[in-house]
Structure formats: C-alpha cells, structure tokens
Amino acid sequence: MSMSEDLLVKGVRRLEWAETHMRVLAEIGRRLVEEKVLSGVKIGMALHVEAKTGMLAITLARAGAKVRLASCNPLSTDDSVALALRERYGIETYAKKWESTEEYYGNLNAVLDMSPDYVIDDGADLITILHTKRTNLLKDVKGANEETTTGVIRLRSMAKEGKLRFPVISVNDAQMKYLFDNRYGTGQSTFDGFMNATNLLVAGKKLVVAGYGWCGKGIAMRAKGLGANVVVTEVDPIRAIEAKMDGFEVMPMLQAAKAGGQGGGHHHLGHRLQGHYPAGAPASSEGRLRDGQLRPLRQRDLQEGVGGLRWSPEEGPGVRG
C-alpha cells in the first residue's frame, strides 16, 4: 500500500470513528435528508479541517447541499481527513497542513468561487473577503454563522458601522458552545497539542493561563487535574476572584511570566513577553486569536491591574481566555 493509500485509509477511519460518536449530528442529518431543505443549496465552509468538521460537511452533502470546505487555519488541517473527504466522500476540500499565506487565501477564494448561498465560518475570514475583495458575490449570500470569539468581534464591529451585508448567527454565543466546547473541548485539546509538541510531563510544572473566560477555565481545570501548579492572570476583577476561589494563584501577567517554571506552559502571552519567560518555557496560543491581532503592549499594561492587559471590541482582542 502506498503512502497516499495509507493516508486515505487513515482519514476514512478517523471520519468513521467520529461519526459513531456524533449522535446529535446524525439525528440532525436524518431530519435534513427527510425534509430536503438543503437540496441544491451551496454552502461555503472555512473550518479546522479534521474528523468532526469533516462529518459536518459530509452530513450537509448527504442532505443534498453542494459543499466546499477550506481550512480556517493554515496549521490545523488533518491531511488524512482532507484526502478522505476529497477521494472517498466527494467533498470539494481545499486544505492542507502548513499552508503558506498565499495558499491559505487561495483556498478561501476557491470556496467562494462557488458563489455560496450560505457561509459557515470560523474566524470570519470568508465573510471578510466577501465584504472586501469579493463584493460581487454578496447579493447571493442569504446568511452565515460564525463560530468563535475573534470572528464575532470582527463582525459586531462591522454591524455597528453598518457594513455587514447579510445576517450572521453567532454560534459562539450559544450555551452549548461556550459552556461545553470552549471549556471542555479547548481544555482537553490544549493538552493534546502541548504534550504532542513538547513531550513534557505536565505534573509539577508551573503553568500560566492568561484569561479566565470559558477557554481559560477549561485549560486551568485540566492543568490542575494533570498536576500542574496553575497561575491565572485576568483583567476582570470578578473573574480574577472566581479563579482565586477555584483554588488558583492569581497575579499580574508580567509577574506570572517571570514565575513560570522550566517547561511551564503559557496560554497566549504573546511574543512581547518572551524576554520575561524562563529559558525553555514553551508558549501556546489557544483559541483563534493571532499574534498580529494583538495591539501593541506597554510596559505599564503588563504591571497594572489584576491581569495587566486591556481589551475592548473597539481596539480589538487583547489577551482573554
């Protein structure tokens, strides 16, 4: 069996495994097939391309929709799943791991070339391109949904300025999203990535979590369960008190960065703090925020308040879990 055949089999098995554990999606898919409401509908998607999102694309296609899928992150694609979606399930999939910037935006535009009726987005890149470089397609778009905090912030800013041209559902505001996916899903997947990337033991490490929102709560909870000494930084004093009451040490960001032990994981501290890390301490970014979206930080920002970093929808996302 060739390497490509091995990769295809691996992707099919991952999709089949995911399908057996997605009973709610299966029930929704059954209803969609019966009701035929998606027959002939064109759906453009930009999501992390892996087994679960792959099954979403397959479910929509089984219900009669014409689906195109690209990755919402150049680094997150499961190449085995992307290959299986194309070769076994007939889903037009434009994604690979380690895409260049040119490839990333080329793939997003390939999705939009179908002139979608609906858009499923994660980070709002598809929606942003529609409103800037592909405005000729706006007349055909009936609506969209957006999955994550970063995208919702961008879209609310557009709506406030009267620039959003079609309705968008904020999936991120659904209780099932932030109470469960953000907290438990991100909490677990963070350490899947951390341990795969570093091969380090979590127990005994000092781990700094920047922000005690739903993602931060999940990460802190999982880190504590794995035996880490967890420090939380937070700009909101109420959330800071909540973290303290939950048993975590709370301190300003700059102090926390200096306190991080050898190999301690840091949740989205940003490159401007790297000079304050202990040597060898890995840093990670959880969620959808990109370093380029962080506004410049001042030394005073790092020292003031409970957590030290300011945030507002007008200025864009700062560091919050």
Image: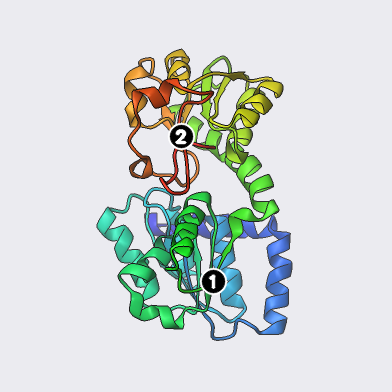
Please name the amino acid that badge 1 sits on. Pro
Indicate the quadrant containing the C terminus: top left, top right, bottom left or bottom right. top right
Q: Residue at x 68, y 72 (%)?
A: 29
Q: How far apart are marks 1 and 2 (CA)?
A: 30 Å
Q: Circle 1 — which element?
A: loop
Q: Is mark 2 on a helix, strand or loop?
A: loop
The colouring scheme, among rainbow, by chain, secondary structure or one colour, is rainbow
Residue 13 visible in the snapshot:
no
Q: In the picture, which quadrant includes the N terminus?
A: bottom left
Of residues 190 and 141, the one drawn nearer to the viewer in this rendering: 141
Horizontal and vertical percent for residue 120? 51, 66
Q: Residue furthest front?
A: 161
For residue 69, above or below residue 41? above
In the image, is 288 to the left or to the right of 298? right
Label drawn at residue 310: 2
Counting from the top left corner in percent of width and height, residue 231 is at 56, 20
Q: Mark 1 points at which residue?
A: 167
